[in-house]
Image (cartoon, rainbow, N blue to C red):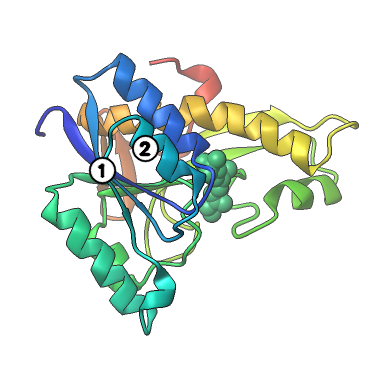
Amino acid sequence: MQHPLKIAVLISGNGSNLQAIIDYQQQHPDVYQIGLVISNKADAFGLQRAQKAGIPTRVINHQDYPDRVSFDRAMQHEIDAQGVQLVVLAGFMRILSAEFTEHYLGRMLNIHPSLLPKYPGLNTHQQAIDNGDAEHGLSVHFVTAELDGGPLILQARVTISPEDDAASLQHKVHQQEHLAYPLVVRWFAEDKLQLKNGQTWFEGQPLNKPLQLEERST
Ligand code: GAR
């Protein structure tokens, strides 16, 4: 693995996970380097975060393309032109084509605000509250063609208290996301993490269940 690992981060909005990944890079410049940030929305606040950190940005607006495949090909062209080794989806809210997910199979991560396989898709925090769940959380996984369905790597849990609403729960989950995501990118950079035959491998062993953030700090 080339060091530091060159990554691209794809966003659609606020970019607080991108910020966590930037902050980690600034503290550990030898682990990974963000070579490119792509947003499908020109007004995504995450673009300003990247520019402030001196990271190259591109806006590729999905509305400028006739279909999903041509939009994805435009992103692929930019990503591959930069020699990127890992694609990191951080609040990127577009469904990806099978062609794109196949091209980056084993080289693309996503973070999702639920304990997958519970609650793929949107409004995860409200769904957890409405179902009376005692806990909620996040999942980091390899991306496959199945939406929020690829092999799990790491989860972190938060307790749902009676006072929680969707906003407070989202805040709790975000705090854990900001710890979890840079750590997983680091593991990939350190060659500890692979996707083999549809299964996540960590430190040379297949994972039967996702790692738990609470049990790991490095
Ligand atoms: C994060 O909570 C992330 O888990 C979620 O979008 C949010 C983006 O926040 N992603 C998904 O829902 C993907 N299915 P951010 O822009 O502040 O990083």
Q: Which residue is mark 2?
A: 50
Seen in the image, is 181 located left or right of residue 212? left
Q: Position of residue 205 (x, y in %)?
A: 29, 33
Seen in the image, is 159 located left or right of residue 152? right
Q: Is residue 120 above or below residue 217?
A: below
Which comes before the other along the chain, label 1 or label 2? Answer: 2
Residue at (22% x, 23% y) in the render? 31
Q: Is residue 25 above or below residue 56?
A: above
Disc 1 residue: CB within 8 Å of ligand 1: no
The amino acid beneath tag 1 is Pro
Callout 2 secondary element? helix
- State the residue in front, 21 or 154: 21
Figure quadrant of residue 99: bottom left
Q: Is residue 210 visible?
A: no
Q: Which residue is mark 1?
A: 56
The amino acid beneath tag 2 is Ala
Q: Is residue 64 above or below residue 184?
A: below
Q: Residues within 10 Å of mark 1 (few under 14, many from 20)?
A: some
Quadrant of the drawing holding the N terminus: top left
Seen in the image, is 16 located left or right of residue 105? right
As drawn, the residue found furthest toward the bottom would be: 66
Q: Position of residue 19 (x, y in %)?
A: 44, 31
Callout 1 secondary element? loop
Disc 1, disc 2: CB below 8 Å? yes
As drawn, the residue found furthest toward the right would be: 162
* Distance CA(mark 1)–CA(mark 2): 7 Å
